[in-house]
Amino acid sequence: MVEGQEYITVVIPRRGINDEGKGKKHALYRLISAAETEYVWMMDDDVSFKTSSLSDRLQHPTTQVSSGTPQAVGSQTAMLLDNDLIILPLRMESENENPSLLERLQIAEYAAIQQLTIEAAQRGKAVMCSGANLIVRRDRWLESYKDLHPEIPSGDDMFLLESFKGRGLKIAVLDDPRFEAIVRPHTSWCAFFRQRMRWAGKAPKYTDRDILLCGAIMLMTNLLQLFCPLVLLAKFPIEYRLIKKRDASVSLFTALLLEILYPFYTIISIVGGIFLRKW
């Protein structure tokens, strides 16, 4: 790929969109279909970046970015764009100088999830990705649209990952702070559990072996911890390493409290997601 000859389009579906009554996935389909570039960079409309502009990340002079705007791809990015899907990093940060306990717990959990996402993908066993910050080959995304379960409002990213893996497409990860998007934690328990129920509600639709195995291990270890709290002694060092490797600011107390509470809200999320179908 020659610098300046390939372009990427930023695609930002707006939060709460009800595109022709068909939701976010249809909005993505419309935006990605309209793109005229080989790649699209999918972002949520509420993410932010540490760098001042998109051009700082792409290392190429660009104009202001808006949804659906083509941007020139710099040489370092171009090196990765022989892949079909590129998982980009995310970090959760509170806007509050003194985050609440709920926010701190979410930040710790998100750090563990992100580190697991990165490490699994680096080993060729991708089990998670987020449409909040993701680069994908446009034609491949359109080919996979039928696999995204339009009947389920959320999950376009995970079902896309499953589809790409099932088709043997090339998946890479770019763990570069310049490409790291910032997301915000929920500030209410209701919003927090609604999100977790949406995540859990999609689980019965997953078919990828790596994703199912990862989910089964997490579920079994949390159930074991409920019946035998000593399991925490074996589980905590592993998850604490994931947390600290991704976000060194998380305290030992917060990480430990998260591990103690995790089995309880995992069960609540699963029950709510599967039986109440909180998609």
Image (tube, helix red, strand yellow):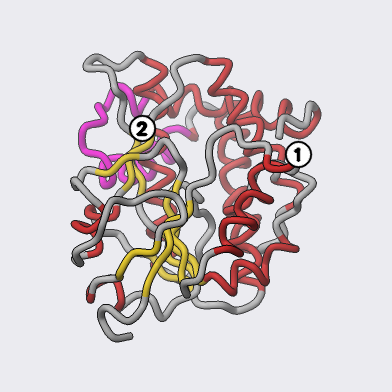
At label 2, the amino acid type is Ala
User: Does the magenta run of residues contain 247?
Assistant: yes
The one of 16 and 184 positioned closer to us in this rendering: 16
Asked whether residue 150 is in view, the answer is yes
Disc sitting over residue 137 in the figure: none
In percent of width and height, residue 106 lies at 41, 28
Q: Residues within 10 Å of mark 2 (few under 14, many from 20)?
A: many
Amino acid type, mark 1: Gly
Q: Residue furthest front?
A: 63
Q: Element under label 1?
A: helix
Q: Give me the residue at 22% from left, 50% from top.
A: 53
Left or right: residue 82 versus residue 273 is left
Please tell me whether residue 63 is drawn above or below residue 108 in the rendered image.
Answer: below
Magenta highlight range: 232-256
Residue shown at the point (27%, 78%) measured from the top left: 4
Does label 2 or label 1 sit earlier along the sequence? 1
Q: Using the image as rendered, state which of residue 194 and residue 6 is in the foreground.
A: 6
Q: Which residue is mark 1?
A: 21
Residue placed under numbered mark 2 in the picture: 108
Task: Give the overall secondary structure of the magenta segment.
Answer: helix
Q: Residues within 10 Å of mark 1 (few under 14, many from 20)?
A: few
Q: Quadrant of residue 60?
A: bottom left
Q: Position of residue 131 (x, y in %)?
A: 51, 50
* Residue depicted at 19% across the width and 57% down the height: 56
Image quarter of residue 209? bottom right
Provide residue 103's location: percent of width, then percent of height: 38, 21
Tell me what residue is drawn at x 72 percent, y 26 percent. 272
Under circle 2, the secondary element is helix
